[in-house]
Image (cartoon, coloured by chain):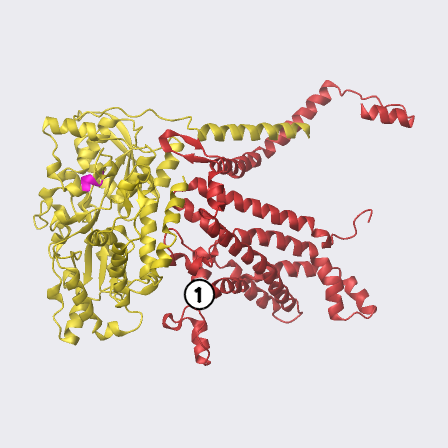
Chain colours: A red, B yellow
């Protein structure tokens, strides 16, 4: 109807919509069906293994399983238990706080360290590929193995912790690392340097994608290295910085590393919580609640985390004007 | 595009509807009827047995099935693997997908939690029939373990215990002998069945004089003080009342009695028997502690010790020269020893209750109990007539006659089980509540103040009860 009015207003004769022949329609239908059939394994996979558990968890978060008596709809009871200060609100706040601090500090920190590693690995030196491999090697070491390694390294001198042995040999006092509420989170963030090789690779690929003529032109105009970095390298790398930020923050919010690092220190209620819950992260809490058979409560926590991840992702996308995607049409 | 949207919407709606239907229990099975006391040996049937994938459980199940099939050759018992670390999760999941096994391995606390979901079959009726027919008597078995298999530990029989699991102290004779040689003290004579907490203190104090245990971070005991089987006998002695039945189950734990009981346990850490902050003595590893509070069978601990190449000995020397078991210490005149039970429960919707009961009866028969021992795990039989481990017809003692296995059966009336949460609405939280009190003890022994560990306890218990 709208189209007809617009055409009439413009004085153009309305193009008559021709109905395709039965053969064409049949061919289109077969094409559509063929496409759907090809996509079906993926669609089924996504529905079964992504959407079904998600929908089920969402439903669970509003219910209480009574076994044979069936499932009781408890409305927002689990959310209230998690958020109300009458119950677990204070702990929930602390856990979400820890998780947010970790995600918001460790991701930019990792990006910066990765950037400097990439700069070092980008020099045209003989044997540079060996350095690149050495920087990247920790990324392929399983998290459990590196976690155990770091627990040993951060142990006190009686447990032969390498850092504390180094400190005492230099006449410095021992550091508490994971054994103190004040230093646990910082130590965990510091541990992130270990896997900075991952973002180094992404930075390196960003550097390689920057056209060399941009640097040549800048040098002809008298730009120094710092100006090249600020005006060319960083702006041209923003899509990758943005990608790293989004995936890094989502990954950080879902982090379960403390379970590996301090997992054995806690009981069923606080496995992986660290001293004074200083390393208690949301994903770890969800796992603990699930193991204590409070599945529905765990589902509610999972959806609270989902909500937080959603908010951060939304904020990141809404504030992504600084990302440079090249010369776009019309700009 | 419109078709794709339509397709996606339909798929989404189907998914949601499917979830709701499954969640609402669309495949809820009928409750199994009453079991018969007799079963024709020629009966053809198939039942499913849920077993843990941990330890020797697979082998025990295979032995039980093989010996059961000698009586009932046409009955197929299929095994279903469960995680073993979380039976409640496993059964709830298998129930909701309509795949629950007819019989499954369980412990007494998980049994209470699963019973709160009404997923267990009640054997009381068939047992009553057996008693009437003169084919079954509770007197043939240690009372504690059958009680632990009952609803609220005093009601419907929901679990058939397969072994008499009691806390004993596994101890390293070799280290003690070395300590005696260095210090000239007589330590081993203080360790005997029925020994008291005072004697335990004396032994620990003497061992602390041994140069090995004067090193930092060398502790004596893996006390597992956060384990209810260890802490509850001590609570009982001090008269701790955790919930007040007369006050509608109100928490009454925070009291002078509880403070005294917690102090008693914390003293082990203060005196250096156990480490602060939950650090245990690492009994199982070389150069570890001397004592381990456990209900494990001797064979399991011995295997672990051998795996850790500890203690170093020549193959000719008997292991019992190096390592032995003794009863858990008691308070003189007020004796309690922690006991628990592992056994087999049946799913309320099991397909063939008569066959299930026949299998259960087989588990607690002499043949069944020997079949368990033949799997290589010398679990203590629940039958009183099999207590004599020196008798070769009781297989659990074979290979272990040098050990003090009487520790497992010494003064069975001293057995004490954790019943503090037995109250409608609480027992389904049995596992969680037990863990919470264990955490309180561990934190207090670990150095936190009494106020810090009990200050929020009321609120924490309320929160636990709110989570379902």
Q: Position of residue A326 (x, y in %)?
A: 76, 53
Instruction: Decide whether the magenta segment is chiefly helix, strand or loop.
Output: helix
Of residue A214 and residue B219, the one placed in the foreground of this image is B219
Quadrant of the rendered image containing residue B218: bottom left
> Disc 1 is attached to a residue of which chain?
A
Q: Is residue A285 among what the camera can see? A: yes
Q: Quadrant of the N terminus of chain B?
A: top right
Q: Residue at x 26, y 42 (%)?
A: B108
Q: Position of residue B459 (x, y in %)?
A: 39, 48
Residue extending furthest left? B391
What range of the chain is rendered magenta?
A: B145-149
What residue is shown with label 1?
Answer: A180
Query: Would you say residue B431 sits in the magenta stretch?
Result: no
Q: How many marks?
A: 1
Q: Position of residue A98 (x, y in %)?
A: 51, 56
Q: Is residue B323 among what the camera can see? A: no
């Amino acid at each position: 109807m709208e189209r007809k009015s617009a055409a009439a207003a413009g004085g153009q004769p309305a193009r008559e919509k021709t109905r395709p022949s039965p053969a064409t329609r049949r061919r289109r239908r077969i094409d559509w069906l063929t496409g759907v059939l090809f996509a079906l394994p993926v669609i089924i996979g996504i529905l079964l293994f992504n959407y079904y558990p998600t929908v089920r968890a969402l439903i669970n978060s509003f219910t209480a399983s009574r076994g044979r008596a069936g499932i009781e709809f408890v409305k927002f009871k689990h959310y209230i238990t998690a958020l109300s200060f009458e119950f677990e609100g204070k702990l929930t706040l602390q856990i979400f706080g820890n998780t947010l601090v970790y995600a918001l500090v460790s991701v930019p920190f990792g990006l910066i360290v990765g950037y400097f590693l990439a700069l070092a690995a980008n020099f045209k030196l003989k044997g540079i590929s060996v350095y690149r491999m050495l920087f990247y090697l920790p990324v392929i070491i399983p998290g459990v193995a590196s976690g155990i390694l770091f627990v040993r390294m951060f142990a006190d001198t009686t447990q032969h912790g390498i850092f504390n042995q180094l400190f005492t040999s230099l006449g410095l006092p021992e550091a508490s690392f994971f054994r103190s509420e004040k230093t646990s989170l910082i130590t965990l963030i510091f541990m992130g340097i270990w896997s900075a090789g991952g973002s180094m690779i992404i930075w390196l690929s960003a550097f390689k994608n920057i056209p060399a003529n941009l640097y040549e032109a800048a040098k002809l105009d008298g730009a120094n290295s710092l100006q090249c970095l600020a005006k060319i390298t960083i702006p041209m790398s923003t899509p990758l910085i943005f990608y790293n930020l989004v995936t890094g923050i989502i990954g950080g919010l879902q982090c379960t590393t403390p379970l590996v690092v301090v997992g054995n220190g806690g009981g069923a209620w606080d496995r992986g919580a660290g001293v004074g819950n200083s390393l208690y992260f949301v994903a770890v809490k969800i796992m603990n609640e699930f193991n204590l058979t409070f599945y529905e409560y765990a589902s509610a926590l999972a959806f609270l985390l989902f909500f937080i991840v959603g908010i951060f992702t939304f904020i990141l996308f809404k504030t992504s004007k600084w990302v440079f995607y090249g010369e776009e049409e019309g700009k | 595009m419109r078709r794709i949207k339509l397709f996606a919407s339909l798929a989404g709606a189907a998914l949601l509807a499917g979830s709701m239907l499954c969640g609402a229990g669309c495949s809820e099975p009928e409750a199994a009827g009453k079991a018969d006391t007799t079963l024709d040996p020629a009966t053809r049937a198939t039942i499913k047995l849920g077993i843990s994938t941990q330890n020797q459980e697979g082998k025990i199940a295979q032995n039980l099935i093989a010996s059961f099939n000698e009586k009932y050759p046409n009955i197929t018992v299929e095994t279903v693997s469960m995680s073993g670390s979380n039976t409640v999760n496993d059964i709830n999941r298998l129930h909701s997908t309509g795949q629950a096994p007819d019989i499954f391995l369980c412990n007494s606390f998980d049994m209470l939690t699963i019973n709160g979901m009404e997923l267990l079959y009640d054997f009381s009726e068939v047992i009553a029939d057996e008693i009437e027919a003169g084919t079954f008597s509770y007197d043939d078995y240690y009372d504690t373990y059958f009680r632990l298999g009952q609803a609220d530990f005093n009601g419907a029989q929901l679990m058939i215990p397969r072994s008499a699991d009691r806390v004993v102290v596994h101890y390293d004779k070799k280290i003690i002998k070395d300590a005696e040689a260095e210090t000239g003290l007589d330590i081993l004579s203080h360790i005997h069945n029925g020994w008291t907490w005072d004697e335990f203190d004396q032994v620990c104090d003497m061992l602390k004089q041994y140069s090995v245990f004067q090193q930092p971070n060398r502790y004596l005991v893996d006390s597992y003080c956060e384990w209810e089987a260890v802490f509850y006998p001590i609570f009982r002695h001090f008269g701790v009342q955790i919930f007040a039945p007369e006050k509608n189950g109100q928490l009454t734990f925070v009291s002078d009695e509880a403070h005294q009981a917690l102090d008693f346990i914390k003293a082990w850490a203060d005196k250096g028997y156990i480490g602060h902050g939950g650090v245990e003595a690492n009994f199982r590893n070389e150069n570890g502690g001397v004592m381990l509070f456990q209900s494990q069978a001797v064979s399991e601990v011995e295997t672990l010790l051998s795996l850790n190449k500890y203690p170093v000995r020549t193959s000719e020397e008997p292991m019992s020269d190096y390592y032995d078991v003794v009863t858990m210490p008691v308070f003189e005149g007020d004796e309690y020893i922690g006991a628990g039970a592992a056994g087999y429960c049946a799913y309320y919707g099991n397909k063939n209750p008569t066959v299930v009961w026949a299998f259960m009866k087989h588990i607690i028969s002499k043949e069944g109990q020997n079949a368990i021992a033949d799997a290589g795990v010398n679990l203590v039989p629940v039958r009183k007539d099999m207590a004599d481990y020196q008798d070769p017809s009781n297989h659990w003692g074979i290979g272990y006659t040098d050990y003090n296995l009487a520790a497992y059966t010494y003064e069975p009336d001293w057995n004490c089980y954790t019943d503090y949460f037995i109250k409608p609405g609480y027992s389904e939280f049995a596992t969680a509540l037990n863990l919470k009190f264990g955490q309180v003890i561990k934190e207090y022994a670990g150095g936190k103040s009494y106020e810090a560990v009990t200050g929020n306890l009321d609120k924490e218990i309320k929160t636990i009860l709110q989570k379902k």
